Amino acid sequence: WVWKCDATNELCTRLPSQGNSNSETLYPSLEVCRLICGKYGSLWPQPTISTKISDELFMFPLSVIKFEFSIKDGEAKEILQGMPNIFLQLLSLEDTSNCPQTTNKVTIHITVNSDNISLDWSTNETYSLEVKTEGNQNSVQIISNTIYGARHALETLSQLTEFYPRNDGSTCLAMVDEVLIVDAPVYPHRGLLLDTARNFISVTSIKKHIDGMAASKLNVLHWHITDSQSFPLDLPNLPNMTKYGAYSADKIYHPNDIKELLSYAKLRGVRIIIEIDAPAHAGNGWQWGPQAGLGDLAVCINQQPFRSYCIESPCGQLNPVNPNLYTILKVLYNDIINMLPKGEVFHMGGDEVYIPCWNSTPEIIKFIGDKPRTTETFLDLWSSYQAQALKAYDAGVGNTNTPIILWTSHLTEIDVIEKYLPKERYIIQTWVPAADNLPKNLLALGYKIIVSTKDTWYLDHGFWGSTVYHNWRVVYNNKIPRDYGVLGGEVCMWGEYVDETSVESRTWPRAAAAAERLWTDSSISVNVAAKRFYRHRERLVSRGINAEALIPRWCYQNEGQC
Ligand SMILES: *[C@@H]1O[C@H](CO)[C@@H](O)[C@H](O)[C@H]1NC(C)=O
Ligand SMILES: *[C@@H]1O[C@H](CO)[C@@H](O)[C@H](O)[C@H]1NC(C)=O
Ligand SMILES: *[C@@H]1O[C@H](CO)[C@@H](O)[C@H](O)[C@H]1NC(C)=O
């Protein structure tokens, strides 16, 4: 087969390789055709500010690529200099060593204006990417404010470069020869939640997710690392947490693993936000209090019948009336703070506190004393837990400025949230269906929010209870509010029904559909996006991510025909 670009419809058309007229430009693969066909070629996500891509290709062997850097000496430069290796690895996924050596040259010049390496919601991720070709000289100019903008530019450049199988049997690299792209994301928080507590996922597998995120310009890995089922995070000063909470000795994340993942992610423009869900979703790992003379740190642990004490088995909820809990939390938070970059935000969970658990615990009933045990009494208890947990956290960081994220819950309901959670301090992650007004109402009160649309952006749905699977089109079409207070959104891969054998294919490529929503927030129809998305799915697979199939191969090879 060969392909030609139908420029009017921006579609690549498959033809038999014999008997075509010489006047047509034909490409040896769909991938090469897709590079130049249509305004946005094969780029995912679609750039936002301006995009010009020529329909000519420049061919060269891998060995002629040279990098030049303009950036102040220091840590930023060191990180920046590590980024081209990732780019070159992607260009080495196919063997091009038999590409004839030519006098063609490719020079990639990267200018980064700031040496600030912090990656947060005010990081400037803007970049411009210009490719020019004169004779046998191809020059690429990347200009960005931060190293993360430069990283995005290299990702885009990798999507403008393709393996080109030539008639003589050799394979070369082909890059679009004239390009001008200026690009910046719509939302600063573009996240994927991974849950490694219900089922453990290895560091190797987490890295693959980070690869998929980098390919799709997602920038936040929200790591739901612990839950009531297991506590796989090794804390140097609290070895009992994994001793009592890990599934086994090889299902533990050690501080070195965290360090390795943080730097792996940083090099790929991804920050890692750690969540220790509490006071609910905490059980296994917390059983050792009585034996250590500290009393019950958590209550209702693994209690049955679970439906009387929690929403999902096994039960467990921290014991808010035990003062020793806060001493232990201080140690726990301190260990985590020491693993993370200075000033990094922290996710304190805060969802699904189940009042009947506390309301059936003698120690808590005694603490409440003569007060009526109403919902309000328990909300007060919960919020006093939250305030003390925050104090324990702040003692560890040594200031009271670190943003804290909490899930929506009874505490975040519109009529009570201002009483319990100051908006200067708390960012609220909403997990309600699209039709729910809660996000809008929180914005109206002045809270900053992160949107995880329940159902649509819950990638675990469709495999349990009455939940429904949402295909990539539905994920893509999920619009979230455009408002100063909306930091962005996250798709959530809850881990009850996936482990390492299936988590990649259940997450990808659908997480990448959300990535374009969060980067571009375009109003184009999903049918127009489809050809680029199908190409992106192939890209993920070629990079070693087991992204699930979207269509029959015939439909991939015959764009617009299915
Ligand atoms: C670095 O950038 C962050 C925003 O990403 C900003 O908050 C911080 O103040 C900057 N640091 C310096 C030293 O300019
Ligand atoms: C981000 O950096 C670009 C230059 O790369 C600059 O043009 C733009 O104004 C910056 N954006 C903000 C919000 O500072
Ligand atoms: C760990 O738990 C044991 C009980 O199994 C207790 O005796 C010990 O004091 C605990 N260790 C720490 C460091 O708290």
Image: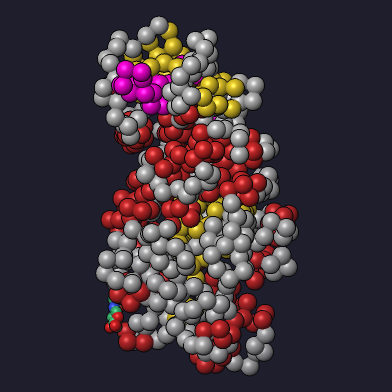
**Extreme top residue here?**
135
Residue at position x 42%, y 81% in the image:
297
Residue 37 position within the rendered picture, expressed as x and y whole percent measured from the top left: 55, 24
Residue 426 position within the rendered picture, expressed as x and y whole percent measured from the top left: 58, 59
Q: Nearer the viewer, residue 221 or 397?
A: 221
Residue at position x 55%, y 53% in the image:
491
Q: Nearer the viewer, residue 520 or 487?
A: 520
- Please check the rendered image and state whether residue 165 is part of the magenta-colored stretch, yes or no: yes
Q: Is residue 306 visible?
A: yes
> Image check: 135 left or right of 370?
left
> Image check: 199 left or right of 409?
left
Q: Nearer the viewer, residue 136 or 536?
A: 536
In the image, the segment drawn in magenta is: 162-183
- For the stretch drawn in magenta, the main secondary structure is strand
> Image check: 100 left or right of 216?
left
Q: Quadrant of residue 438?
A: bottom right
Could you tell me which quadrant the C terminus lies in?
A: top right
Residue 176 position within the rendered picture, expressed as x and y whole percent measured from the top left: 46, 20
> Image check: 351 left or right of 196?
right
259 shown above or below 175: below
Q: Is residue 396 visible?
A: no
Residue 555 position within the rendered picture, expressed as x and y whole percent measured from the top left: 54, 38
162 shown above or below 19: below
Q: Nearer the viewer, residue 301 or 307?
A: 307
444 shown above or below 497: above
Residue at position x 44%, y 83% in the image:
302
17 shown above or below 386: above
- Please check the rendered image and state whether residue 333 is part of the magenta-colored stretch, yes or no: no
Residue at position x 73%, y 58% in the image:
435
